[in-house]
Image (tube, rainbow, N blue to C red):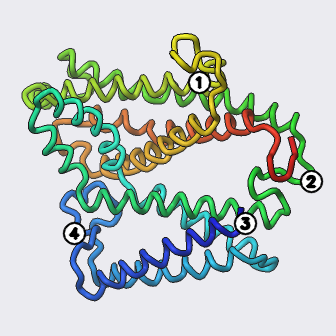
Amino acid sequence: MNETKAPHAAAIWSLLYAVAGLCWALGVGGFPFGEGDPDGRFTWFAGLRPQPGGWVIAATGLACTATALAMTRRQPRLHLPLLVFGCCAAALLLIIVPDVRVLTTVAHAPIFLVGGMFGWQEAWTDLAASFAAPVLNQSVCVLGGALWLTATLNFARRASDSCVHCGRGAGWDRQATLGTAVYVGRLATWIAVIAPLPYAVSRWSWALGIPLGVSDDFLRWMRESGADIGGAVLATMAVGGSLLTLGLVQRWGEVFPRWILGLAGRRVPPMLAVVPALAAAVLLASGGITMVHVSAAEIGTGDGGLGQFFPAFTWPVWGAALAVATVAYHYRRHGACRHCHRA
């Protein structure tokens, strides 16, 4: 595998997005930020306009393209600046640009699909509406962030003379790394299991008619609109996801249990857990940060009050803990590298 494949992919993505920014700056429609986002209260870019926004995007994209191409070569004097730039680019695209709507779209999609199949015609309309242009743009940016994170990790490994594929270097100590992964992974997993409970308790309470943290008028609106049931379903999904997180430290996260027909007793492929868990961690962190952002403006002005927003304050913690637990699981499960043969 080409060692510079990831930086090249990040460069191509950055160049394409720079072209999109240039088009928006020149008057082409479809600008997904600011005035082009009808529900911009959730984003950090509510005041951004095609001009100068498009020019800023184009210039940033070109800078990212040049930086990604520089990562394809060994740059001893520029190791630190390139690494810092890469980390900032990944954080911007993974955490800052996407907001809670990407998370809610992913969470609501199964509900809308099931509702549509059982005759709830509005479900198809709601599903289509959830994939609005700004949300699709944010999803594209998450993809770009994943490319940038991979490219930066790739460059960091090459800069330290470690294996590009597994990160193991000449001083690799498997026992020490495994011991740290077990301890840190267990702690992070339990934090990730507990973090969604405030959200779940509040939504279940509303479904049961208990105005926990909200006014009676807000609870009445929830019941009349059916949002209380939707909230309870999402809360149940959140708790289900947190329980699945236990698989990162339990035996059934390594070997399929007996009740899974056709797979019982077989080894669980590590990537089957790592990929969806890291994706969930990114969406939880970005969604939680934007919920904290909007709550500063909305707490005290609506009937929802603190109870509507406070449970989501744990989402960034949930996302961070899930990411750490997943990385620890990866290190614990990763066997001998097929490329460097280090175990």
What is the secondary structure assignment of the residue under circle 2? loop
Residue 281, position as x, y percentages in the image: 50, 42
Q: Nearer the viewer, mark 3 or mark 1?
A: 3
Horizontally, is 92 left or right of 297 in the view?
right
144 or 290: which is nearer to us?
144
What's the mark number on residue 3? 3
Quarter that holds the N terminus = bottom right
Dot 4 or dot 3: first in sequence order is 3
The residue that appears at 15% across and 26% down in the rendered structure is: 118
Horizontally, is 299 left or right of 199 in the view?
left
Amino acid of disc 3: Glu
Residue extending farthest to the top is: 258
What's the mark number on residue 160? none
Q: Are marks 4 and 3 in contact (CB under 8 Å)?
A: no
Amino acid of disc 2: Ala
The residue indicated by pointer 4 is 36
The residue that appears at 56% across and 29% down in the rendered structure is: 191
Q: Nearer the viewer, mark 2 or mark 3?
A: 3
Q: Give the Cα separation between the discs numbered 3 and 1.
A: 32 Å
- For disc 4, the neighbor class at 10 Å (few under 14, some 14 to 19, many from 20) is some
Q: Are marks 2 and 4 in contact (CB under 8 Å)?
A: no
